[in-house]
Amino acid sequence: MENTDITKPIKNIEPWWQRFVAGLNEFYHAPYRQTMARAARDEEDFFMLLMFAESLGIDNPASFYTLELQPLFLENFHEWHTRMGMDRCPFDHVGCC
């Protein structure tokens, strides 16, 4: 009987402790969330440029490795080229716009 009474408070403390740790993580990460999202978007934009550079007429030394990734990222291409300031799709063979 005494063992069950001792373990009850420990079980009640765990969820409180986990909520406290989650709150501390949120407090620490919240100011940097927008900065990290912007950095991730910039990194993705650079990767998309690297993948489609050869198609845009820019010499790309890694085109052999990025050519097989183009079909996977083609669905995100419209968002990318509008974010880069291209109103229309620069390719004739891609009908995204």
Image (cartoon, rainbow, N blue to C red):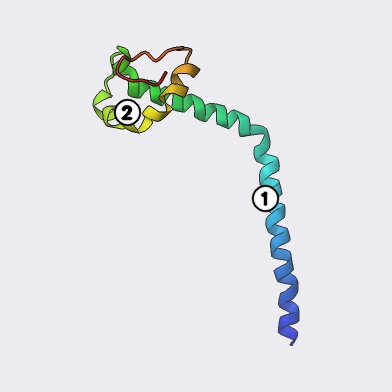
**Given the image, on which type of amino acid does mark 2 rest?**
Gln
Residue 14 badge: none
Which image quadrant for residue 76?
top left
Residue 22 badge: 1
Most foreground residue, 73 or 12: 73
Q: CA distance from mark 2 to mark 1?
A: 38 Å
Residue at 71% x, 70% y is: 10
Residue at 74% x, 67% y is: 12
Image coords of residue 17 (percent x, y): 71, 59
Relative to 14, is 62 above or below?
above
Q: Quadrant of the C terminus?
A: top left
Q: Which of the two marks, 2 or 1, is nearer to us in this view?
A: 2
Disc 2 marks which residue?
70
Looking at the image, residue 97 sits to the left or right of residue 19; the answer is left
- Mark 2 and mark 1 residues within 8 Å of each other at the beta carbon: no
Q: Residues within 10 Å of mark 1 (few under 14, many from 20)?
A: few
Q: Secondary structure at mark 1?
A: helix
**Given the image, on which type of amino acid does mark 1 rest?**
Ala
Q: Residues within 10 Å of mark 2 (few under 14, many from 20)?
A: few
Relative to 3, is 66 above or below?
above
Residue located farthest toward the bottom when viewing the structure as drawn: 1
Image coords of residue 29 (percent x, y): 64, 39
Image coords of residue 34 (percent x, y): 62, 30
Most foreground residue, 49 or 75: 75
The answer to which of marks 2 and 1 sits earlier in the sequence is: 1
Q: Quadrant of the N terminus?
A: bottom right
Residue located farthest toward the left when viewing the structure as drawn: 64
Residue at 56% x, 27% y is: 38
Q: Secondary structure at mark 2?
A: helix
Which image quadrant for residue 5?
bottom right
Which image quadrant for residue 66?
top left
